Amino acid sequence: MEEVLWEGKPFNFGFPSFTTYKITDSRIIIEKGVLTKKRDEIRLYRIRDISTKRNLMERMMGFGDITIFSTDANNSQFLLRNIRKSTEVADVLGNAADKARIKHKALEVTEVT
């Protein structure tokens, strides 16, 4: 069973958001839409790099964007928009990605032997 490390929605200045983000101990899940739902996910061990962007207003209001770069051929870049406490969420994501890479390498080694 996956452990949920963080979940949330983009900050939309009080307007409803039909996008949800979930970070578990093994993947990121992004769901969008109302009538037609689209779901993207990326395995954490595929994350190559994470960056955050916050302009002055976003820093004052406490949110920002997180860009995730991955080794996934189909989805090499994910954008989590308007995330509250974006630097803290990026740290949670980075730590989880490091642990997932270690776990994935350990599984590869045991499968080979």
Image: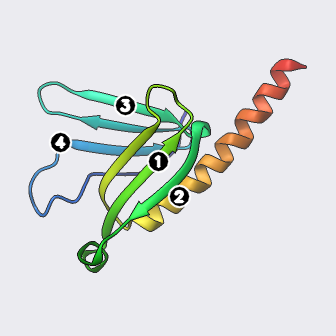
Quarter of the C terminus within the rendering: top right
* Left or right: where 88 falls relative to 8: right
Q: Which mark is residue 92?
A: 2
- The nearer-to-camera label among 2 and 3 is 3
| Residue at (56, 40) in percent of width and height | 44
* Left or right: where 6 falls relative to 35: right
- Quarter assignment of residue 59: bottom left
Between the C-alphas of marks 2 and 4, the distance is 23 Å
Between the C-alphas of marks 1 and 3, the distance is 13 Å
On screen, residue 88 above or below 81: below
Q: Which mark is residue 40?
A: 3
Between the C-alphas of marks 3 and 4, the distance is 14 Å
Q: Residues within 10 Å of mark 4 (few under 14, many from 20)?
A: few
Identity of the amino acid at label 3?
A: Asp
Q: Which mark is residue 111?
A: none
Marks 1,3: beta carbons within 8 A: no
Q: Which mark is residue 68?
A: 1
SS assignment at label 2: helix
Out of 65 and 91, give the one closest to the viewer.
Answer: 65
Q: Which residue was labeled with disc 4?
A: 18
Between the C-alphas of marks 2 and 3, the distance is 19 Å
Marks 2,3: beta carbons within 8 A: no
* Badge 2 or badge 1: first in the primary sequence: 1
Q: Position of residue 75 (x, y in %)?
A: 43, 31
* Left or right: where 41 falls relative to 107: left
Between the C-alphas of marks 2 and 1, the distance is 13 Å
Q: Position of residue 47 (x, y in %)?
A: 56, 42
| Residue at (37, 31) in percent of width and height | 40
Identity of the amino acid at label 1?
A: Ile
* Badge 2 or badge 3: first in the primary sequence: 3
| Residue at (11, 51) in percent of width and height | 16
